[in-house]
Image (cartoon, rainbow, N blue to C red):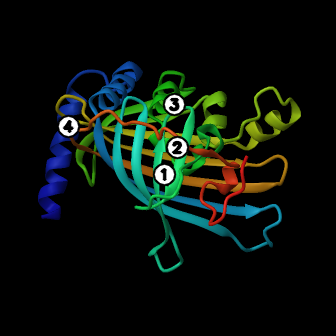
Amino acid sequence: MKRVRAALLAALLLVAACGSSQSSDLKTVADAVAAADSQGMGFNVTLTILFTGGTIPKGRAEQVKAQGTGVARDARAALRYDFLGSDGKPSSRWDLVLDDSDLYSRPYSTSQPWRTAPTASVTALFPGLRLNLIRDSILLASKESGGGITHVNEGFAHQYTLTPAADQLEQLQAMNLQGQGPLETAFLKTATGSIDVYLGLSGNQLLRIDVHLNGTDPQTGTVQKDDFTISFRSAKVKPIPVPSTATNVLPSDLFAKTPSTG
């Protein structure tokens, strides 16, 4: 089976090389993201954030791992989001609803009141799920390459790799430092990132987005490394409403057992 797959991939690469230019078309990629968002898609996400430096003892690291499943449409998403323990099993489970402005959370499958805080403050937990931000990052990319054919779990795909510009790097890493002079400059000296977008070979259907980010908090010296994957699947998605009532909390209390009001 591996030989068959390798032979097929080689043939596809040969066809691609003999065809049109391999240069990435940023508008094509951005349009694929926009189409998926407007039509509605199901998705699965995985996240790993690794923290080192700062107040963390030398040679040690702290880690956040999470996974989720849900639906997205019209710049909104609704999902179940699990934080994972060291054994890989859920340590806490949450219902989430988010749009470009606000994130809403509450313990999974409960009638507890919703909590809310600005989405911008916690984007690092799901950078690839903010599809409007991803689309902007594609259109404003400081560097891009790709269009070649590769194979991922979702199937054969055109892969495009993009480097977000400075403003989008700050937003993706939830470093809200615009206009803060030396702090913003210090962060951008350390910040790096890439976005891999995978489109189906037929019709440029959005299959998957991988987001990889690195940056150092200029105030604490903590180094943060984010790896996020969102895989898409076809689904009939109704318009997603946001909760009609919610309690404002500090971003750090969105997933706390006992939140304080913000």
Return the residue at label 4: 14
How far across and how far down the image is residue 176, in percent?
Answer: 72, 36
How far across and how far down the image is residue 49, in percent?
Answer: 59, 59
Is there a contact, CB below 8 Å, between mark 2 and mark 4? no
Nearer the N terminus, badge 1 or badge 2? 2
- Mark 2 element type: helix
The amino acid sitting under disc 3 is Leu
In the rendered view, would you say 241 is above or below 88? above
Screen quadrant of the N terminus:
bottom left
Question: Which residue occupies the foreground of this view, 242 or 197?
Answer: 242
Return the residue at label 3: 133
The residue at 51%/56% (across/down) is 106
Nearer the N terminus, badge 1 or badge 3? 3
Q: Nearer the viewer, mark 4 or mark 1?
A: 1
The residue at 59%/47% (across/down) is 124
The amino acid sitting under disc 2 is Pro
How far across and how far down the image is residue 178, in percent?
Answer: 76, 29
Q: Nearer the viewer, mark 2 or mark 4?
A: 2
Query: Residue 228 shows which numbered tag?
Result: 1
Is there a contact, CB below 8 Å, between mark 1 and mark 2? yes
The answer to whether residue 203 is left or right of residue 106 is left
Is there a contact, CB below 8 Å, between mark 3 and mark 2? yes
The amino acid sitting under disc 1 is Phe
Query: Residue 127 shows which numbered tag?
Result: 2
In the rendered view, would you say 187 is above or below 147? below
The residue at 47%/27% (across/down) is 138
